[in-house]
Amino acid sequence: MKTSRYLSLYFAEADQNLRELDAHILALEGAGGADALHAAFRAAHNLKGMSATVGFTDVATRAHALEDRLDGLRRSENLDATTVDELLGAVDALRAAVDRARSEEPDAVDETAGPERRIGEASYAAPDGCAAVARVVFRPDTPLRSVRATLAVRKAREVAALMGHAPDTDQEFDGDLLLFLAERPAGTTLEDVLLGVGDVEAVVVEEPAIAAEPGQDAEEAGTYVRVERRHVDALADGVGALAAQHARLAELSAGASEEVDAVLDGMGRLLAGLRVAALGVRLVPVSEVFDRFPRLVRDAAQSAGREVEFKLEGRSIELDRVILDELAEPILHLLRNAVDHGIEPPKEREAAGKPRRGRLVLRARRARAGVAIEVGDDGRGVPVDAVRGMAVEAGLVTESDAETWTAEDVLGVLSRPGFSAAGGVSELSGRGVGLDIVMERVRGLGGAVELETREGRGTTFRLRLPVSLSAAEAVWVRLGGEEYAVPLTHVVQAVELGDGVERTGSRLTVEGDAYAVVELAGVLDVPDVGESGGAALLVDVGGRRAALLVDALLGREDVVVKELDAPRGAHPMLSGVTLRGDGRPALVLDPAAVV
């Protein structure tokens, strides 16, 4: 397939329109059907125009057929479950056509068209106050294109507030005609009028963008910029290295003069802003992954004979794209398990005094220095007694130890590959399918998995994650003469050992809360340099509390974390590397690996 920046943008926007089609068509089964129908029509219409512009005629034809079907439904209002199934089938066929287009040569690609609204050899900036740009795509063999363009401008003025157009229609030109609109058009009146001009292949309404300056790369222009991940990583690394150099310079010039101190303070503020910006470039809303799931849950519910009300909450919460991409499969496992094995069949729910429709929620929310993603249902819950009995029978735990089991102990057993299918306990069968994958993936991201369950009332899986893998707020500690950074994702509190902190054997009590003591020096095999553990990091990982003993607390700081190419056999707690203020490398510790 011929590569072009415009095609990359096309596929990104096509995928977004397909997700919107899924979401809006699914919404037809609930309240607000008229609004959802109109929104679905607009998504199909946009996809049709975009596809015609780049020459993907199969996609454009299928999108046009779906658009016509949706338009007919807007007039007839004859909508039922069968119709929704048919519409979703049409979206699937449309998605398959887009996927085929990714690996095929388009019929015609205008290499001069792009995000900067380039026509021929010139670029045109939208005027101030422009709310939308209507791109009029003429057929390649259009005779007297300037005459058609003049007619299009005249017709557009009759139905829209036109601020101008490009190029000049007084002479012949190649490419598209751009109409700059003072208001974004409602409905399809403008498109219908322009398509009636003749020799017009498509009309695409786009966001206004700033034209590229001479010599400026096309991807630099416009409101949104798509950047390769390697460039984002390089930016984060550069900012981190610059911050380390700034700290070293501040140390060397301490007390030199008030002017030097003032310059360093200004540099520090600028660096703080750069760090925020570098992190922000990597962050995307969780909706980019969450919006894939309503359709999948609906299909799973139909296949399993369940009635499910599925809700998405916290779609605007942002996460590092790398983390979010890695979460798609674990979340899918949890949702499928909830539908297949958590939520009861309608008749069973009615017999238990529950509504026929089970409730399933996928939620994202802020949690301390990270993000919590929850998959919760109001189904049958996990039968803890059955799990306990199976674990004892399998020799995984003694009967006395099983008496004091917590939800986390249950999670540990369920996440053993193949365990949930053993023992012939029908209400348990399948609940652990894929949980080992979930646990492994989330822990690999520096996170933890928690379980809350009440038999007969429901189950919630909670994934606690850092916001970013490359940047984190961390506390610096000293241990055995070395300095380490510990991200605050799981840290509840940092305390000095002394008044108010009581240690009894392997337990540390702080403000009435007990924590299991973990001697980090022993865990990491750190040599004794004569210091004794005088401080502790109180951490909570999946409901498991521990006090990680260190020699001293050195303060908090935002750090840029780079992957650690650890040698074979290295402790899993060594999760990354960062730089101290003087440029020396320091290891990053992950509490989840030892708690």
Image (cartoon, rainbow, N blue to C red):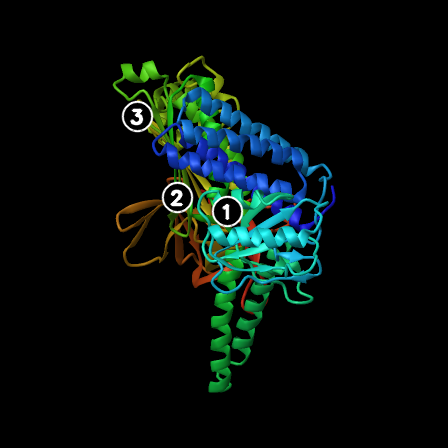
Crowding around mark 1 (Cα neighbors within 10 Å: few <14, some 14 to 19, many 20+) is many
Residue 497 in view, yes or no: yes
Say which of marks 2 and 1 sits in front. 1
Q: CA distance from mark 2 to mark 1?
A: 36 Å
Q: Which residue is mark 3?
A: 457
Residue appearing at x 52%, y 42% in the figure = 192
Q: Is residue 509 left or right of residue 537?
A: left
Q: CA distance from mark 3 to mark 1?
A: 53 Å
- Type of the residue with mark 1: Leu
Total tally of numbered discs in the picture: 3
Q: Which residue is mark 2?
A: 314
Q: Which residue is mark 1?
A: 190
Residue appearing at x 57%, y 43% in the figure = 195
Q: Could you say which is closer to the camera, residue 39 or residue 572?
A: 39
N-terminal of the pair, mark 2 or mark 1, is 1
Q: Are marks 2 and 1 in contact (CB under 8 Å)?
A: no
Say which of marks 3 and 1 sits in front. 1
N-terminal of the pair, mark 3 or mark 1, is 1
SS at circle 2? loop
Q: Is residue 465 left or right of residue 144?
A: left
SS at circle 3? loop
Q: Could you say which is closer to the camera, residue 304 or residue 367?
A: 304
